[in-house]
Image (cartoon, helix red, strand yellow):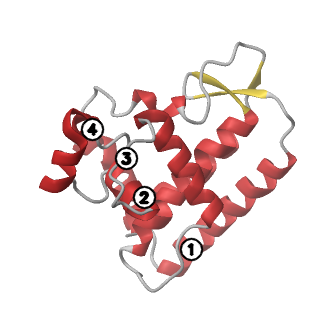
Amino acid sequence: MADLLVHLRLDAEALLYGLAVPCDDAIDRDFISYWKDWPSPVQITFADVRCTWAFAAAYATADSLRGHIDEAMIAAATASRAAPAVRVRFQNHVLAIDDLLAMFAVEFALHHLDLLVAVPDRPGPEPDALELVVCTLDGLLGPHHPASWDQLTYVRKATGRQPLDAADRKELGSEASRYPAFG
């Protein structure tokens, strides 16, 4: 769990970096198309995740990790509220500031679901955040998914947090190969 919390802290810092790099270049991604490069053709290796694991292991207590996450999230929230309506460069793409913020809202909502695995009695993401995830998935996959899926099932299955079963694969047909849309 600590590695996920470190990932969230790093995401908050990445949002701060994104907010700090305005540019005048043409927009080439929105909050939906940002995800179209996933999954990356480059395989993730031990070396890629070692830093996050080491970072997580360096915290002596959960309270110190929570303190750093709180600081990063507060800074990111404050900066996002004050961000001017500009275009920004983020991970070799140019996005409108609202799209950068929406993309991170999707990221944070999904990781909120990941955290609930350890504490299932806690509240889930805000309905607006979950709706943004659904909008993103519909934009990537099309709004065609099994009618038996509720919103949360759709989000979990379309992001690989819950595997497709045989009935899902049958109903989705050839579209099943497009799942997960991103993780």
Name the kind of residue labelled 4 in the image. Answer: Ile
Position of residue 117 measured from the top left corner of the image (x, y, whole percent): 36, 74
Which residue in the protein does label 2 denote? 55
Q: What separation in Å lies between label 1 and label 2 (alpha carbons)? A: 13 Å
The residue positioned 41% from the left and 81% from the top of the image is 120
Q: What separation in Å lies between label 3 and label 1 (alpha carbons)? A: 24 Å
Q: Secondary structure at mark 4?
A: loop
Pick whichever of labels 2 and 3 is earlier in the sequence: 2
Q: Nearer the viewer, residue 81 or 149?
A: 149
Q: Nearer the viewer, residue 14 or 178?
A: 178
Pick whichever of labels 1 and 4 is earlier in the sequence: 4
Q: Is residue 152 visible?
A: yes
Q: Is residue 92 left or right of residue 180?
A: right
Q: Secondary structure at mark 3?
A: loop
The residue positioned 22% from the left and 47% from the top of the image is 171
Position of residue 121 measured from the top left corner of the image (x, y, whole percent): 45, 86
